[in-house]
Image (tube, rainbow, N blue to C red):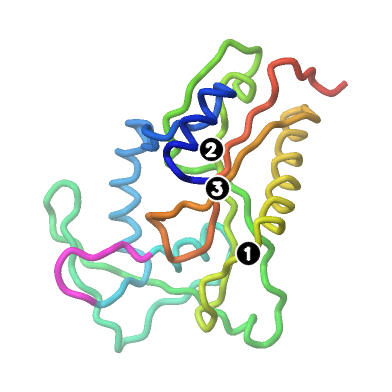
Amino acid sequence: NPDRGFLQALQNAVGWTIGGFDTRPVPEAMEQKKVDRLQILLSYRQDETTGAPRVRMYDYLCDILFGIPMTPVGPEVVMPDFQDLDGHIVKAKWIEANFNDFRAGKPRPAPVFAANRYPYQLPTRSADTEVQAVAQHWLLWYLHFPWEEVADFSDDQIDKDVRREVELVAKSYGFDRVDYVWYRNPAASVPDMFHVQVFWIVPESAMPLA
């Protein structure tokens, strides 16, 4: 439940989860987001509009998360100029996803579980390891093809996928116990591809695997 009051009540109850009124990235992540936004505008196909554009993330996500082959956009695509962070005018050079192999029957990539590049501010506690001291903010992404609607799934399916992924990640850190919460973002800043917010932490009492 992404309702702010519910999230705050949950944090008050368990201590480690995200609160309902502080869902913002840490300051360093905000600066990184500005740099990344410009690079995406310059490198990946965007909607050909005038004025300040909404950053289209679809091809970028296909590239960095799912490893979809990229190809330069065709000559019919008009690529605008952008102003970089130093005020210089820079020419875009766009690429876009090439789905020819998937149209020919290649299987759809599985969902991808990845750390959020712009993690939210979260409470900390005294613990032996980082994954016990502060919740880890990750995202579970589901690919849809351009000729499909943006994917959506039942809560049961998402929870099954999240549980599988957080248990695998916890084991990679040497633990076989993990707590987690997830939710759909009702006002997603990246509507281009279906994803859910996941916060996970290893219990303080958990002992490393032998």
**Up-down relation of residue 9 to residue 114 (above or below):** above
Q: Which residue is the site of mark 3?
A: 183
Is residue 180 a member of the stretch shown in magenta?
no
Q: Which residues are magenta?
A: 49-56
Disc tally is: 3
Residue at the far right: name it. 210
Type of amino acid at the residue the image marks with label 1: Phe
102 left or right, relative to 92: right
Type of amino acid at the residue the image marks with label 2: His
* Residue 118 coordinates in the image, percent (x, y): 42, 41
146 left or right, relative to 155: left
Residue drawn 63% across and 12% down? 127
Please state which of the two labelled residues, at mark 3 or mark 2, is closer to the viewer: 3
Please state which of the two labelled residues, at mark 1 or mark 2, is closer to the viewer: 1
Q: Nearer the viewer, residue 184 or 113?
A: 184
Q: Nearer the viewer, residue 142 or 71?
A: 142
In the figure, residue 23 lies in which quadrant?
A: top left
**Alpha-carbon span between mark 3 and mark 2:** 12 Å
Question: Secondary structure beneath disc 1?
Answer: loop
Is residue 52 a member of the stretch shown in magenta?
yes
Q: Which numbered circle lies on residue 153?
A: 1
Residue drawn 40% across and 72% down? 95
Q: Around disc 1, counting alpha carbons within 10 Å, would you say few (fewer than 14), some (14 to 19), or many (20 or more)?
A: few
**Alpha-carbon span between mark 3 and mark 1:** 12 Å
Type of amino acid at the residue the image marks with label 3: Tyr
* Residue 32 coordinates in the image, percent (x, y): 34, 41
Q: Which numbered circle lies on residue 6?
A: none
**Alpha-carbon span between mark 1 and mark 2:** 21 Å
